Image (cartoon, grey):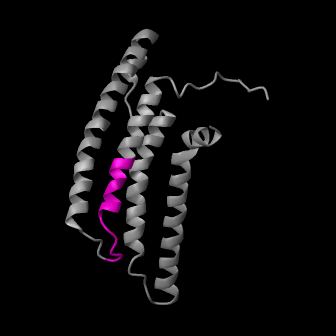
């Protein structure tokens, strides 16, 4: 049970951190190879691009979990608290439907990529491994929105400290 709680709280952060470290290290090595040894790696930009793509799709669920998203709240700030909660609920439902719709079609795209057998140019890895990032990201986003709707991301009040 503790493992599931840890995964629920930290999964996206750990994956995003790993991808960021890998991207920085690989590109750092590429810069050193290019300028210090006058040679370059043929695969570094490609793998960094794929890590970035994975990061982009996983970060959507991270933002949903943390409640940070791009929004214009000037109109909603003028409304009473009850109306704000109704609008927030409606927005979450719309976002849930949007990601569920994207998830359904991303599965079709990955299936088609798998069946085509397309490989990346430099590394030769199957392209469906890159495109499955959409399925993972949209699935995590759907899960995080459902958690949010069920109240899974309630923040403790200011000054709250748990007793141990």
Question: Can you say which quadrant of the picture contains the C terminus?
Answer: top right
Q: Position of residue 27 (x, y in %)?
A: 48, 72
Labels in figure, total: 0
Is residue 149 within the magenta segment? no
Taking depth in this image into account, of 67 and 134 the one nearest to the observer is 134
Question: Can you say which quadrant of the picture contains the N terminus?
Answer: top right
Q: Position of residue 29 (x, y in %)?
A: 52, 77
For this orientation, the residue located farthest to the right is 164
In magenta, the rendered stretch is 122-136
Q: Is residue 51 above or below residue 75?
A: below
Q: Is residue 83 above or below residue 17?
A: above
Q: Residue at x 34, y 71 (%)?
A: 125
Q: Residue at x 30, y 27 (%)?
A: 94
Q: Position of residue 20 (x, y in %)?
A: 51, 59
Describe residue 102's horizontal placement relative to residue 144 as left or right.
left
Q: Residue at x 54, y 46 (%)?
A: 11
Describe residue 126's horizontal placement relative to residue 79 as left or right.
left
Taking depth in this image into account, of 70 and 56 the one nearest to the observer is 56
Q: Quadrant of residue 74?
A: top left
In terms of secondary structure, what is the magenta stretch mainly?
A: helix
Q: Position of residue 105 (x, y in %)?
A: 23, 45
For this orientation, the residue located farthest to the bottom is 38
Q: Quadrant of residue 158?
A: top right
Say if residue 80 shows up in the picture.
no
């Amino acid at each position: 049970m503790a493992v599931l709680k840890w995964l629920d709280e930290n999964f996206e952060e750990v994956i995003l951190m790993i991808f960021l470290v890998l991207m920085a290290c690989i590109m750092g090595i590429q810069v050193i190879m290019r300028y210090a040894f006058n040679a370059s790696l043929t695969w570094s930009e490609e793998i960094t691009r794929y890590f970035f793509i994975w990061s982009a799709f996983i970060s959507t669920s991270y933002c949903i979990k943390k409640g940070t998203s791009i929004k214009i709240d000037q109109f909603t700030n003028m409304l009473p608290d009850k109306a704000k909660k109704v609008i927030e609920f409606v927005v979450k439902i719309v976002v849930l439907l949007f990601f569920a719709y994207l998830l359904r079609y991303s599965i079709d795209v990955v299936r088609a990529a798998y069946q085509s057998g397309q490989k990346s140019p430099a590394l030769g890895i199957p392209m469906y491994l890159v495109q499955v990032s959409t399925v993972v990201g949209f699935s995590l986003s759907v899960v995080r929105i459902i958690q949010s709707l069920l109240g899974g991301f309630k923040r403790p009040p200011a000054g709250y400290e748990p007793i141990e």
